[in-house]
Image (cartoon, helix red, strand yellow):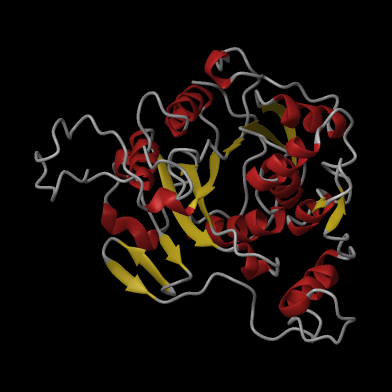
């Protein structure tokens, strides 16, 4: 993949602490974030601390995307509350937090960015989604009332309907060296008016609404494309030095997790913080600097921001994405869409 010269304009939805857009996409593509959009007070403090000159649109449901600056790239990790295995699996439907995908879809339709980048949890693969073509549980031959449409399918279908060609992959954070799994789904979608489909995908037809979905599943080490399978692993290349493989001798203290901790120290260039700190009653509690470090964030990215409680810090780190992981997924997905460079001319809103 060839990055571009100059500054691409980027809009960041559901920004959180900036792990997807500000710390991964913008540095990788040489872009400039022209606005954030996050309603969470704690996340907003982090964004204002690090990017004080970048406006925050606030509540996404009240944002008027016809009046905000047009962007070439739109990113977002819409809420995973209702698609996560840890949630109630309500899926993507009206009235759910994960149903806010519909607002991101609207923003995409209005802004018409050249590229859309999405991140979410693994539950996107199997959580249900609302469908206007499925008015009853038995209408499409479903078994036991299980909806035929899954959350990922709904997102891909919406993108295709808007004229975006999409590729997606599943990638664990451990694939880029992080000391934890944090499996995430990443979707990249290109506007077919600016990026026609690659020649090898011409068999899917030329209608923009058909779109495309290229799936990469590290667990099964395969690609899926229109029912065909081809093997490909998304993760670090084989080899590397001993430290990157986690085999460097190190002082004891982390038990069985020692190799993973030392590997991440080597890759990030930052020593692991102490795991616990004294709590209010003197008892040991989790040190917020540890999950911040485990996400691969610069030291103090969350913990040095004033006005945040310990609970805020832990929640922000827990809800975020590993920037290295997001960058690796994007670097893998863009060539699948035939993208080697992005136009520098501003994208007009439709």
Residue 40: image location, x then y, percent:
67, 26
> Eyeballing the image, is 336 above or below 237?
above
Left or right relative to 309: residue 171:
left
Q: Is residue 156 in sight in this rendering?
A: yes
Residue 37: image location, x then y, percent:
65, 26
Depth order, front residue of 138/193: 138
Q: Is residue 7 in sight in this rendering?
A: no
- The residue positioned 36% from the left and 43% from the top of the image is 151
> Eyeballing the image, is 220 above or below 348?
below
Residue 203: image location, x then y, percent:
27, 58
- The residue positioned 39% from the left and 23% from the top of the image is 95
Asked where in the image residue 59 lies, by quadrant, the reply is top right
Depth order, front residue of 29/102: 102
- The residue positioned 79% from the left and 85% from the top of the image is 241
> Eyeballing the image, is 336 above or below 39?
below
Left or right relative to 269: residue 195:
left
Asked where in the image residue 239 lies, by quadrant, the reply is bottom right
Residue 2: image location, x then y, percent:
67, 58
Quarter holding the N terminus is bottom right
- The residue positioned 88% from the left and 82% from the top of the image is 250
Depth order, front residue of 150/96: 96
Mark count: 0
Depth order, front residue of 246/6: 246
């Amino acid at each position: 993949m060839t990055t571009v010269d100059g500054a691409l304009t980027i809009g960041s939805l559901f920004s959180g602490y900036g792990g997807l857009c500000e710390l991964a996409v913008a540095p990788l593509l040489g872009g400039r974030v022209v606005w954030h959009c996050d309603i969470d007070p704690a996340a907003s403090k982090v964004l204002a601390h690090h990017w004080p000159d970048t406006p925050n649109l606030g509540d996404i449901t009240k944002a008027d995307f016809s009046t905000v600056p047009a962007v070439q790239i739109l990113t977002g990790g819409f809420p995973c509350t209702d698609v996560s295995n840890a949630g109630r699996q309500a899926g993507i439907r009206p009235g759910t937090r994960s149903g806010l995908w519909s607002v991101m879809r609207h923003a995409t339709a209005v802004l018409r960015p050249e590229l859309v980048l999405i991140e979410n949890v693994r539950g996107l693969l199997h959580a249900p989604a609302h469908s206007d073509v499925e008015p009853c549980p038995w209408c499409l031959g479903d078994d036991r009332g299980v909806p035929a449409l899954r959350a990922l399918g709904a997102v891909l279908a919406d993108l295709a309907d808007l004229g975006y060609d999409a590729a997606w992959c599943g990638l664990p954070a451990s694939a880029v060296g992080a000391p934890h799994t944090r499996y995430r789904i990443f979707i990249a979608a290109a506007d077919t008016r600016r990026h026609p489909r690659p020649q090898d995908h011409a068999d899917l037809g030329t209608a923009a609404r058909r779109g495309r979905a290229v799936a990469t599943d590290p667990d099964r080490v395969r690609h899926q494309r229109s029912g065909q399978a081809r093997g490909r692993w998304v993760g670090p290349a084989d080899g590397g030095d001993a430290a990157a493989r986690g085999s460097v001798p190190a002082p004891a203290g982390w038990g069985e997790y020692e190799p993973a901790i030392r590997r991440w120290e080597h890759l990030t260039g930052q020593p692991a913080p102490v795991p616990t700190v004294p709590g209010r009653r003197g008892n040991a509690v989790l040190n917020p600097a540890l999950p911040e470090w485990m996400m691969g964030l610069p030291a103090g990215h969350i913990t040095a921001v004033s006005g945040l409680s310990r609970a805020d810090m832990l929640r922000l780190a827990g809800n975020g994405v590993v920037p290295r992981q997001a960058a690796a997924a994007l670097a893998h997905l863009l060539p699948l869409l035939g993208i080697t460079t992005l136009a520098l001319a501003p994208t007009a809103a439709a």
